[in-house]
Amino acid sequence: MLGIIDISPVAGSVAASLISCLEATRSVPMEDACVQSNLADGPDSTQTAHAGLREPASSPLAPEAPLLSGAEITIQAMIDEGVDYVFGYPGGAVLHIYDALFQRGDAIKHVLVRHEQGATHAADGYARATGKCGVCLVTSGPGATNAVTGIATAHLDSIPMVVITGQVPTPVIGSDAFQEVDTVGITRPCVKHNFLVKRLEDLATTIRKAFYIAQSGRPGPVVVDIPKDVTDPNIKIPYVYPRDLSIRSYNPAKRGHLGQIRKAVEAMLDAKRPIFYTGGGAILDDAAAPLTELVRALGFPITSTLMGLGAYPMTDKQFVGMLGMHGTYEANMAMHETDCLIAIGARFDDRVTGKIEHFCPHAEIIHVDVDPSSISKNVKVQVPIVGPVGSVVTDMLGVLRESGGRPDQTALAAWWKQIDDWRGIDCMRYDRSSPMIKPQFAVETLYKVTDGDLYLTSDVGQHQMFAAQFYPFDKPRRWINSGGLGTMGFGLPAAMGVQLAYPDAQVACISGEASILMCIQEMATCKQYSLPIKVVLLNNGYMGMVRQWQEFFYESRYAHSYVDALPDFVALAQSFGHVGMRVEKPDQLEAAMREAFAMKDRFVFLDVIVDPSENVYPMICAGKGHHEMELPPTMSERELA
Amino acid sequence: MRHIISMLVENESGALSRIAGLFSARGYNIESLTVAPTDEPSLSRMTLVTRGNDDIVEQIKKQLNKLIDVVKLQDLSEGEHIEREMMLIKLKAAGPDREELKRLTEIFRAKIIDVTEASYIVELTGASRKLDAFIEAVPEGLITEVVRSGPTGILRGAKGLTL
């Protein structure tokens, strides 16, 4: 699969790139380029780019250190990091690296995507499903800018990812060379950190640093921008991978403060109406096991954000559903009434809190997070604990057992009684007798057909909310969606990363007809690598969530939320070499889904025509608090309408 | 409230834009920012003046600390500290104004460091408020140019902001 190096229209012709670079070199003397970059760079950039490293790059090398070029170092460093998949797209500035990759055969499997955005989402999906670091390799200029959406997506959801971008040769940096952009500048606000490697001697250390930073503390994407001359195959230096690394300015918390943890456990034991509120951090830190143990030991209700679903089994009776804008009535009411909120790896996002002034008005708040800047950012908390979620929760369990304390059982029973009353409202009711397929019914059917054993990626919009509401995940890393950035087009490429990581698992992408078109080209990648993903398209002809907001808040003026010229998705899937199916009647849905999932080795695109007028309920409208939810219409209200 | 935040940052390319970018991206304000290398060549010292309520300044400090390039950070405003800013000010000094401006310079213990028939350049160092006061004291219409370094600062006492 490495045999053919495509030069994309995006990447332009290599020849043009080379000519342009040569010309640029002639017209811009090296000194000028340096002066320019100094001005742009701020503090004295003549210093080594890696002053933070305790072990300098010039440390004595083992005599047997092999001589490698920059391109070979890039590949070897990835191998030394244990990278198995690289998602990428070649182009002029990364050709040396691709050549080195080619020469290493199958040491690293490269997945050729059809657009750099697809590469980043695929690496992201791989990282979310496995907990390992996702890796991308893209060229300079448009290669890098195309990757930005995926980098920002990973950044907002704290996903560990290393993105290697090619750059124009150092002598022409700053000269507006062909396919030159200031990649480090463009990505700076949407990465955990980024590097421009100006010297070959710094390359191995920088890649090591990138993987370390991406995966430690609060994870995130790291960009390593490598100019083409740094990867020159003719310049070789001894290579030793700097395994033991410490960065003096970067020391993420390893344990929570035990005094604070004791205080938190005391507050939990004193609580009358407690609730756990967990987020993506619980999944990122693989804290599901200790979290489940702690929640069960205490007998408290637990709710989760969109990002945290699956850290605690959603089918368990202590789980009261997702919270926030489209969370359950019981979860949000419990948040409003709680006297002790235990927030774990969650960041009090505006979609979760509703109007901040109304947020948890009666609660003492305990907040566990590895990132100190998440604590008291949006909501002031009384018991802050900075530390990795898994270790803190484990310590909480230890303290709880040591104390031998038990929560107030009478108060807890009354609290559960109250929660059960709220549950009785049935906040996610929908019309089950509809002659059209309701999107909720489609998700319920998906759950039934897959026995709840599925990796489900999602795009963004109504289908995402319906999936989160109606597909109960009992395991972490099974629900994969762009929560923070809300990136349409995420689902399909993310599913590729998941399927490659787990070739034998059932992987599906739930999407809408608007979202899927944003990365539809990746169907070709799925064909090339024989990925048996199942796309479940909830096709309502509208950008459903936009339409819903226009109905609620713009007096049903549906400005450009209706997609007037949709492709025939069945034919489209077939043209990519896949199986396409369409379902329009509720009574045909289950059989069609069973048929699709029975095709274990085929990519199946299931175009499910759903009710175009369905809305996501319940809902906290903008500017409202948790206790001011809009509930779905009752049967009689529906009839009136 | 006004805060003076002092930082040791990696003397690396891009460190300054990371810090400046953080402020613009999160909507914090920077009143002034000074930066220069220290005795340790791998480190720069940055002094940043910002304004905000306690919660905002707390967030600013956390966000700055989160940047990989920021090695150490101190809010000078939290303790006894010394603050100094330097100003170079070019004044129209002709006729009767010449004597008046010279007197003013002496009162403020400033120095005249350049003289022509029609102008003085005055150098003045002190707390920012002292510099403000000098500007106010110059009779109207006599200022040609004002160049201020922005404040730098250091904590009083034996303890230092070091690695």
Image (cartoon, coloured by chain):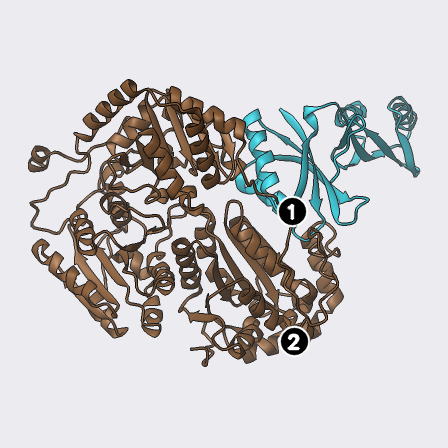
Chain colours: A brown, B cyan
At mark 1, the secondary structure is loop
User: Closer to us: mark 2 or mark 1?
Assistant: 1
Q: Residues within 10 Å of mark 2 (few under 14, many from 20)?
A: some
The image quarter containing residue A455 is bottom left
Q: Is residue B103 visible?
A: yes
Q: Classify residue B48 as left or right of residue A102.
A: right
Whether residue A589 is situated above or below residue A337 in the rendered picture? below
Query: Looking at the rendering, in which quadrant would you find the C terminus of chain A?
Result: top left
Q: Chain of mark 1?
A: B
Dot 1 crowding, Cα within 10 Å, few <14, some 14–19, many 20+: many
The residue under the point 25% across, 43% down is A469
User: Can residue A623 be seen?
Assistant: no
Which of A483/A215 is in front? A215
Q: Secondary structure at mark 2?
A: helix
Quadrant containing the N terminus of chain A is bottom left
The residue carrying mark 2 is A23
Residue type for callout 2: Glu
On the image, the x and y values in percent for residue A64 come to: 69, 72
Give residue A504's quadrant in the image: bottom left
Q: Is A575 on the left-hand or right-hand side of A141?
A: left
Q: Position of residue A232 (x, y in %)?
A: 64, 75
Residue denoted by label 1: B69
Near-viewer residue (A366 or B64) = A366
Residue B31 - label:
none
- Vertical arrangement, residue A394 with respect to residue B108, above or below: below
